[in-house]
Image (cartoon, rainbow, N blue to C red):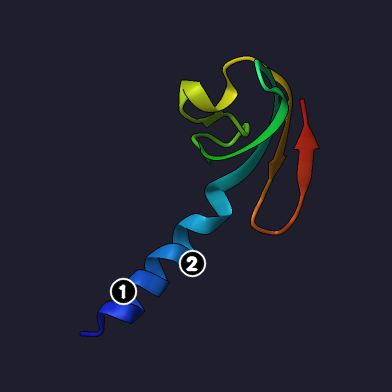
């Protein structure tokens, strides 16, 4: 049993369902780019993330592991 193989295997299995988020927020210090992640939870593409990642977002860009992006 190799721990590295188990970790690598787990990452390969879940990475298609993980989104990288780039969030543009207006803050008291000006406009900021915030990075976060989300997890796809169903076949329709619904995803969940932490509230603080998207709270007050002006723009969200989600990127899949295969580099496909979508903006909202």
Q: Residue furthest bottom?
A: 1
Drawn side of residue 8 relative to residue 35, left or right: left
Q: Position of residue 31 (x, y in %)?
A: 75, 25
**Rendered position, 3 above or below 30:** below
According to the picture, the residue beneath numbered tag 2 turns out to be 12
The CA span between labels 2 and 1 is 10 Å
Q: Secondary structure at mark 2?
A: helix
Drawn side of residue 71 relative to residue 15, left or right: right
| Dot 2 or dot 1, earlier in sequence | 1
Residue 68 numbered tag: none
**Rendered position, 4 above or below 38:** below
Image quadrant in which you'd find residue 28: top right
Name the residue rendered at 63%, 14% in the picture: 56
Q: Position of residue 52 (x, y in %)?
A: 49, 23
Q: Position of residue 23 (x, y in %)?
A: 68, 31
Image quadrant in which you'd find residue 9: bottom left
According to the picture, the residue beneath numbered tag 1 turns out to be 6
**Is there CB contact under 8 Å for labels 2 and 1?**
no
Name the residue rendered at 61%, 46% in the picture: 20
Q: Quadrant of the C terminus?
A: top right
Q: Position of residue 1 (x, y in %)?
A: 20, 85
Pick the residue in front: 69 or 44: 69
**Rendered position, 25 above or below 34:** above
Drawn side of residue 5 relative to residue 37, left or right: left
Q: Residues within 10 Å of mark 2 (few under 14, many from 20)?
A: few
Pick the residue in front: 1 or 71: 71
Name the residue rendered at 70%, 30% in the picture: 32
Pick the residue in front: 65 or 46: 65
Image quadrant in which you'd find residue 67: bottom right
Q: Secondary structure at mark 1?
A: helix
Q: Residues within 10 Å of mark 1 (few under 14, many from 20)?
A: few
Name the residue rendered at 44%, 64% in the picture: 11
């Amino acid at each position: 049993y190799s721990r590295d193989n188990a970790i690598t295997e787990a990452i390969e299995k879940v990475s298609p369902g993980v989104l990288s988020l780039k969030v543009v927020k207006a803050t008291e210090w000006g406009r900021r780019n915030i990075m976060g992640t989300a997890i796809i939870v169903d076949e329709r593409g619904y995803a969940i993330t932490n509230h603080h990642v998207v709270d007050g977002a002006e723009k969200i860009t989600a990127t899949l592991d295969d580099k496909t992006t979508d903006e909202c």
